[in-house]
Amino acid sequence: MTEDELRTIITRGEGEKVEFKQNFNNEAIISIGAFANHKGGILLAGICDNGQLTGVSANSETVQNWINEIGTKTEPLIIPDADEIMLDNKKVVIFTVHEFPVKPVSVKGRYYVRKRNSNHQLTVDEIVGYRMKSLNMSFDAFPVSTNYEDLDREALALFSQRIRTTGRYKPGTDLHADLIKLGFCKKGGITRAAELLFGTHHTAIHLGRFKAPSAIIDDIVIRSPLVIAVEEAMDFIKRNIALGYEFTGELQRKERWQFPLPAIREILLNALIHKDYRNPTDVIIKIFDDRIEFSNPGALFGNLTIADLQTDHYQPRHRNKLLAEAFYLMGEVEKYGTGFIRIRAWLEEYPGLHYDLVDLEDFTRLTIKEKVVEKVVEKVVEKVVENLSENQQKILDCIAANPYISAKEISCKIEISHRKTQENIKKLKDAGFLRRIGPAKGGYWKIA
């Protein structure tokens, strides 16, 4: 590392992969262990937290002793690279730490990981998760006490029928033998994945239809085997989102749902496949007038970031490999990291929608929602704007936010009678500002 490169790092300050220490001490070793458990990083000894250069009193023998101390206090043993640089006549020791392949690394029996610009001690569950990942194992591969005979016959039959249809696996005549071959069952027992897919389990999908954050008008808790639960969840979603129709000049009308169903199904499947099943919290789906939210226990897995998922070339990571395999064999998902690419493609057909993904460390939330638009009345010809009443402007705003809104819902939102709402809608239609696409029930509004 050159002096100029070092000055640039100091100027940028501490971060996910950079830590400053005025002196070499146990806290410095903890940071080194945290870097090894994350994506690697560098520790600069001789720099205060605020970036002030103080330097350290150390010769080559001292630095070698520090490296030996790191090795004796870490398990597995960590040996970082160490460089010494003189900067403004003060010595800075640079420890470069690479991500360790077998995690987690402990420091004096405790485990830490780098998060943003600080070190966090791992919980027992997190330690187990790191260990399973290092051993190329997933939580859903562990055996459970349930027997194959206890599994749901309908769920097994559905799985068998689907894999025969897709052709992604050539089954034999004995489904149990196929499940053993695929890793879902073990001789004498089954895995957690098989219990989740085909059996009785303690996880659930909790869905609700909301008119406001605290006003629930319909809800359901689904605890079926996951291969069946997907269909039950999709049925509830379709009952609680709007359905319109488009007429494209052909004899048949074309259905158009409020949200693209293929994208909704993909998000639902991703929630079930990537959920952290050690967490007892349900997958929660909330449906509002203008959005649908999927909240899922478990942070993004395998160092994936939101920025990665916004590209077309991210590397897929599977928290539950057997669940991913099952839904792949059924033709429900791909295993090539194309889920978010396809979601974006489906949303291109709905220019009024976009998605928002948030990673909140112990769970993720994905929302498909209508884009915030400027007041629609600003888009009409200026010379006729003054001819619109305040209520007519409000009606256009409501429709811009939700093209599937009913006249009754509009009257409630803008607090005028249903008759007055209908009268104003007719005036807007007659003036050419508004037209109805499809029938009164099932259609939607389009602002001219």
Image (tube, rainbow, N blue to C red):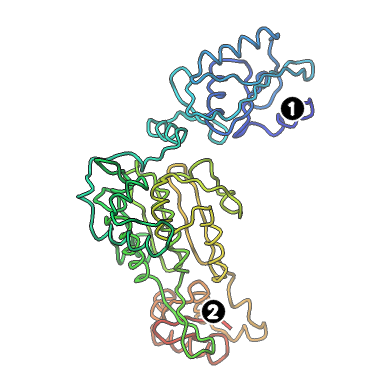
- Disc nearest the viewer among 2 and 1: 1
Mark 2 surroundings within 10 Å by alpha-carbon count, few (fewer than 14), some (14 through 19), many (20 or more)? some
* Quadrant in the picture for residue 29: top right
- Figure quadrant of the N terminus: top right
Q: Is residue 285 above or below residue 186?
A: below
Q: Position of residue 101 (x, y in %)?
A: 53, 30
Residue 386 tag number: none
Q: Is residue 274 visible?
A: yes
188 displayed left or right of 108 = left
426 displayed left or right of 52 = left
**Comes first in the chain, label 2 or label 1:** 1
Residue at position x 41%, y 74% from top? 242
Mark 1 surroundings within 10 Å by alpha-carbon count, few (fewer than 14), some (14 through 19), many (20 or more)? some
In the image, what residue type sits under mark 2? Gln
Residue 6 tag number: 1
* Quadrant in the picture for residue 286: bottom left
97 displayed left or right of 178 = right
Q: Position of residue 166 (x, y in %)?
A: 42, 63
What's the distance in space between the residues labelled 2 and 1, CA to CA?
Answer: 59 Å
Q: Position of residue 436 (x, y in %)?
A: 49, 86
SS class, disc 2: helix
Q: Is residue 371 visible?
A: no
443 displayed left or right of 181 = right
**Given the current orientation, which residue lies at the most extreme top position?**
61
Residue at the spot of label 2: 393
**Given the current orientation, which residue lies at the most extreme left position?**
150
Residue at position x 59%, y 70% from top? 374
SS class, disc 1: helix
Q: Are marks 2 and 1 in contact (CB under 8 Å)?
A: no
